[in-house]
Amino acid sequence: MPREELRSLVLAMRAHLEWLQAGGVTGLPRGAEGVAAPPAPPTRPAQRPAVTEARPPWREAAPLADSRERPAPSRPMELPLPAVALAPALPMPAPSRAPQVVRYADLPDPLPVLGQEGLDLTRGILGECTRCKLCHGRNSLVFGNGAADTKLVFVGEGPGAEEDRTGLPFVGAAGDLLTRMIAAMGLSRDQVYICNVVKCRPPGNRTPEPDEIAACRPFLRAQIQAIHPQIIVALGRTPAQVLLNTTAPISRIRGKFSSWEGVPVMPTFHPAYLLRTPSAKRQVWEDLQLVMTALKKAALPS
């Protein structure tokens, strides 16, 4: 064999052996007849066993499936939520101030007791009243206060902001004026009884609506029955029209006695009107003088 040929063969064999060695082959097995068997195809290096890391439970993630086997989602993926034991549903409580049907039978007629007992009975039946929509905006129910055995009852329209806050009738600016009017008659507030047509403040001090007046009317009637006064002073248009069952304006009916179930009623201007119209105070004083005269006559022995 020529020398150059032999050299090329040796170089080729050496390159082949280096290639086998790089593939992990460390020897060449012999054939059955002592002839070197053809080398086995190189094998890939054995893969190292995967090392499983200890992860905290809040960081574990589920293995991802092969994307080729996963169908295209038709909607956003929804992650399963842990099962939670739900408490049995409880019935919703009824609104504490749901309007009720007005029934005059709520109060016995006539009242079985009079005086303070009659007022207490009426207040107890009135309760935390929800008989009209005014209950939804009130802070305090304003029943009335004063002497249960008095001869004189003052009836106003409805509570204002101060009355709604305190639960007492006529305690604001108009109430201060009424106190001075009563004092001018030679009396004090604890010697008369003061109440309103409606017992809850109308929104924005508006005039009470017919359904609201109807809801409170039986309780106003029971209050007057329990006291059995000699004279009622109606302060303003609303109480005058309610007690006298009229639509006449207060300017026409003031200063003249009318009757509510046999009890004389003197309509006059409301103290709040006098604050806006001081010139009307003289007319109101004339009306109160008529009341004072009537009370003195009633006090004379027959």
Image (cartoon, grey):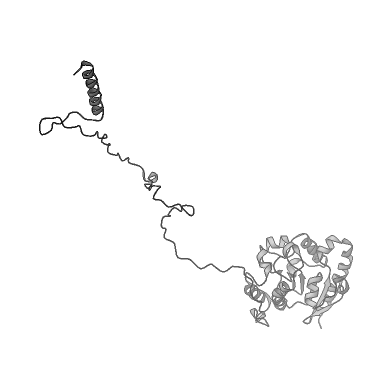
Q: Quadrant of residue 26?
A: top left
Residue positioned 72% across, 60% down in the render = 162
On screen, residue 106 versus residue 158, left or right, reads left
Q: Is residue 72 above or below residue 201?
A: above
Image position, residue 302 (x, y; %)? 82, 83
Residue positioned 83% across, 78% down in the render = 258
Q: From this viewpoint, which residue is outermost toward the left?
A: 33
> For this rendering, which residue is in front, 89 or 169?
89
Q: Is residue 171 above or below residue 5?
A: below
Image position, residue 189 (x, y; %)? 75, 66
On screen, residue 48 versus residue 230, left or right, reads left
Residue positioned 78% across, 75% down in the render = 242
Q: From this viewpoint, which residue is outermost toward the top?
A: 3
On screen, residue 75 versus residue 246, left or right, reads left
For the N terminus, the image quarter is: top left
Q: Quadrant of residue 100?
A: bottom right
> For this rendering, which residue is in front, 297 or 19?
19
Image position, residue 176 (x, y; %)? 78, 61
On screen, residue 19 versus residue 221, left or right, reads left
Q: Is residue 247 above or below residue 206?
A: below
